[in-house]
Image (tube, grey):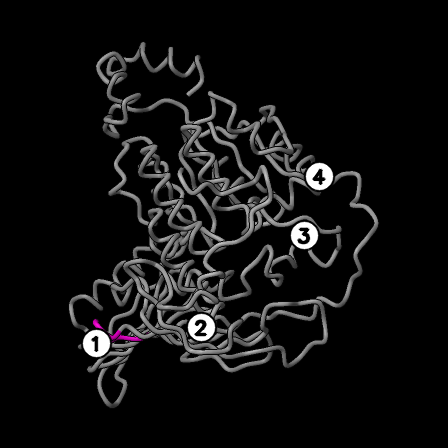
Amino acid sequence: MTQLSRRRFLNTSVGAVAATQFFTGKASAADVNGTIRAAVLGVNGRGRDHISVLRKMQGVEIVMLCDPDEAVVRPRAQQLEKDTGRKVETVADLRRVFDRKDIDIVTVATPNHWHALATIWACQAGKDVYVEKPGSHNIFEGRKMVEAAEKYKRMVQHGVQLRSSPAIQEAVKHLRDGLIGKVYMARGLVYRWRPSIGKKPDEAAPPANLNWDLWQGPAQERKFSRRLVHYNWHWHWDYGNGDVGNQGIHETDMCQWGLDVKFPSQIVAMGGKFLFDDDKETPEVLCSAYYYPEENKMIEFEVRPWCTNLEDGAGVGNIFYGSEGYLVIKGYGSYETYLGEKRTPGPKKSVGGEMEMHMANFIEAVRTRKKELLNGPVETAHYSSGLAHLGNIAFRLNRRLQFDPKTEKFVGDEEADAFLTRNYRKPYVVPTEV
């Protein structure tokens, strides 16, 4: 909170009683009504949605936008000032955001390879965090995020907004209550229109408006190329995780939530590039399966990039299979059920506005300091992202993998274990001790 906000808060009728509770993390929602000051990290893509939602929220003020590309951050700031009538600061280096004691929360919409370190640094600086999916770029990072949130007692919300949808919450209750009988399998679907990205060379120097060192962050240094900036980094292993680790995190999370599982013991994956001779490194098509022998459950996951059928109307979503029927999740806020041999339509529901509800849920947890209120706590960032990482590792090694969910290591497999982390580039190092 700003000094002005603190004074206003302390002068309210409840402020004198609640102040100690709030600043020690023990306040209730009724006690804390001060302005929450926010910074958005990464404003080219998903960050625009963060800005749009936050600027409309009562009691929240965006005071800083951060992006290493001046050509991106400048127009965002100008538009925000036009929309709100308030000046907003801009900065290239996210470390300058964390230096600011008057910033309460940060939202992270950077490329994937920055998500975990940005979250950890924010927690260490005393900020609460809303971090986009995938929470991590590898499994090691996900565990460090969990440890940082716990150690510094920060609210960390993962951007899996379907968890805040009343419709999807109702769907999960149906699964728990036995509407479709014994639920034994979940299927994740990512059928997105992903065209060729062509071929683009390395260049002698990045454009003057882009701080290329900051953009690369934890990744090893390489020459600038427009094959990466700004969106197509998703399809390169150093920065992205393919579509299973992009769009697919919503669906990996939904699979785990609906089945009530975390990490599997066995993983297989197969796929490749079948359509385009372009610069993508990640597979266009990926079929993966995850087996949970102790729970006697499994997850199937499919990524398709181009012309394809839908599955009972779902192209981005999930299907849960039970002994008495199946349940279809469509997008982020809609479900349908089909019961018995004749697939008789059962309960269904569709509700919009899940992004706004998810951000509001985060702000409520920030105000109350009650982690249990978070619909997408930091653990979801670790497990849902980790499931995608496991599938990608199996694909890259082209063999079946055995994984120990307790140690979060592969079983007697040093080659596979090497994919659990990465070589970090100083000073952008995800620490072993957070």
Which kind of residue does numbered mark 4 sit on? Asn
Q: CA distance from mark 3 to mark 1?
A: 43 Å
Disc ID at residue 230: 3
Give the image quarter of residue 94: top right
Dividing the image into 4 quarters, which one contains the N terminus?
A: top left
Residue depicted at x 59% and y 55%: 239
- Give whichever of discs 1 and 4 has the lower sequence position: 1
Q: CA distance from mark 2 to mark 1?
A: 20 Å
Which numbered disc, 2 or 1, marks the residue closer to the eye?
2
Residue on which the image places disc 2:
189
Q: Do the numbered discs 4 and 2 sit on residues whose CB atoms are within 8 Å? A: no
- Give whichever of discs 2 and 3 has the lower sequence position: 2
Helix, strand or loop status at disc 1:
loop
- Give whichever of discs 4 and 2 has the lower sequence position: 2
Which kind of residue does numbered mark 3 sit on? His
Q: Do the numbered discs 2 and 1 sit on residues whose CB atoms are within 8 Å? A: no
Q: Do the numbered discs 1 and 4 sit on residues whose CB atoms are within 8 Å? A: no
Which kind of residue does numbered mark 1 sit on? Ile
- Give whichever of discs 3 and 4 has the lower sequence position: 4
On the image, the x and y values in percent for residue 245 come to 49, 62
Helix, strand or loop status at disc 3:
loop
Which numbered disc, 3 or 4, marks the residue closer to the eye?
4
- Of all residues, the one furthest to the left in this rendering is 177
Q: CA distance from mark 2 to mark 3?
A: 25 Å
Q: Which residues are magenta?
A: 293-298
On the image, the x and y values in percent for residue 88 come to 60, 26
On the image, the x and y values in percent for residue 210 come to 73, 41
On the image, the x and y values in percent for residue 303 come to 51, 73
Residue 143 painted magenta: no
Disc ID at residue 211: 4
Q: Nearer the viewer, residue 375 or 223?
A: 223
Disc ID at residue 180: 1
